[in-house]
Image: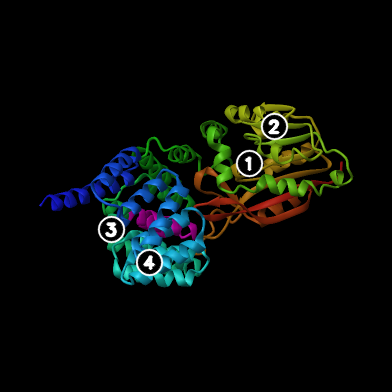
Amino acid sequence: MHDLQTTASAEALTQRIASLTQAGHLSAARLLLAAVRRLVPPSPRLTELSARLSMREGRLDLALGELDEAVRQSPGHADLRKCRAELHLQMDDSESAAADASEAVILDSHDPVAKALLGIVMLGLKRPADAVACLSEAIMADPGNPAYHEGLAAALDATGDADAALATLIAGIAAAPRQVQLRNAATLFSIRRRDFSTAVRLAEEARAAGVTDACLFGLKGHALSSLGRHDEAAESYGEALKLGPDDVYVRHLVAASGALPAAERAPVEYLRAVFDGYADRFELHLVSLGYRIPGLIHAVLAQHPVISAGKRVGPALDLGCGTGLVAVAVSDLPIGPIIGVDVSPRMLAFAAAKQLYAELREVDLLQMLIADATRWPLILAADVMCYFGALQDVFGAVHTRLAPGGWFIFSVEELLPDHDGTIHGAGDWALQRQGRYVHSKGYIAQVARDLGFTIVTLERQVVRNEADAAVSGIFAVLERNGS
């Protein structure tokens, strides 16, 4: 009787250890694990608990040592294999993860967890067809598991079957209608493929089903804004803020929704408010998105005829300089002095700390160009023309201020058709999500030629990534002709 009670008590305690670890109460879990180990002899289950706890603590080498020894002693224990496969994934060792996950499937061919794990490993190894097979079998065994549907959708998308991927997510929603992660995944997937109408419908279906989530309302706002339904987008962003008042990204979306859809440019007051609130995390966020424009500017300037001749280009004007990322990117080139312009005092404070600018001015760039008398050999505008819709006025002001032979280097986001072929605006430019305008390549070329620029470079480029999808942009170098 005593042994039975001890066994039952130990089982309850092991479940408690797993719950505490999952909840992040790691110190309490570690203390309880030590107590249980005094109650019962060593076992694969205790080793797995200890390894998972070490993984959550970031002690990956310790976890691997425990699991290696446990697998050596109990090579036929599937749970140990699955745990070690997860650890290998965390350590970016996909080949070892595949070996352990495969062995776990062999040991228990009916285990959906092992099959799903092997599928995720196959996807990481760029073997999406194998991933589809494994994850499909996992769903057949456990159709209500949302993670399996999400994994299969990713695998199907990797094979190029986007329609099947979306259908998988929708099937997962039907099987687990209260799972917000699947609804978010399906809505986000629709946005990534520019099927904004479906994204809005999915978000509205979630609300009708009683599923409310800050992320879901934010995604709906993205989709509505991309459809040109800006008033509704602002309402959706407001709902997101109510549900996630401390979410800095949601707060940024709400601020961005203040842009006026009929305006030909973003209001200066709006830009100042958005970027003052964004300054602290601006650089980290852009780096995390794989922001490419400063690097593209450096590459093209390295080929500038004056620089190629071993001479210096300057002075240079950095429009919308922000925190100074462009100045950092070109700091090894003979360019300068550099003068930075921005409407956000907090962004300018970060730029000043880099000590790369000869001068920083808090002023609207269009007003500055109109009032300025300098003839600039070089004017840079990284990701700032996206806050102008109509480009004639600002391009005209730049042309006036460029010295003969001077270069104007800038980037915009590209106006693309939606999933159903719809092109917003007049086909030249349109206001889209987060208060940014998008432009067509043909429109930029026409405006440049009308104003007397020579097009040195006008090419499609990836600006950055958002939601695991490339943001298509246009990178341009225009040269002023004549006197």
Check disc 1 and report the residue beneath it: 384
* Residue 419, visible in the rendered structure: no
Q: Residue 182 carries which label?
A: none
**Is 356 one of the magenta-colored residues?**
no
Check disc 2 and report the residue beneath it: 340
Residues in magenta, as a range: 181-205
Choose the circle earlier in sequence order: 2 or 3: 3
Residue 144 vertical position relative to residue 283 in the rendered view, above or below: below
- Report x, y in % for residue 65: 44, 52
Amino acid type, residue under disc 2 in the picture: Gly
Q: In front here: 199 or 34?
A: 34
- Report x, y in % for residue 257: 47, 41
Q: In front here: 362 or 279?
A: 279
The span from disc 4 to disc 2 (Cα, nearest Å) is: 59 Å
Check disc 4 and report the residue beneath it: 104
Choose the circle earlier in sequence order: 4 or 3: 4
Choose the circle earlier in sequence order: 4 or 2: 4
Q: Which mark is residue 177?
A: 3
Which label sits in the foreground, 2 or 3? Answer: 3
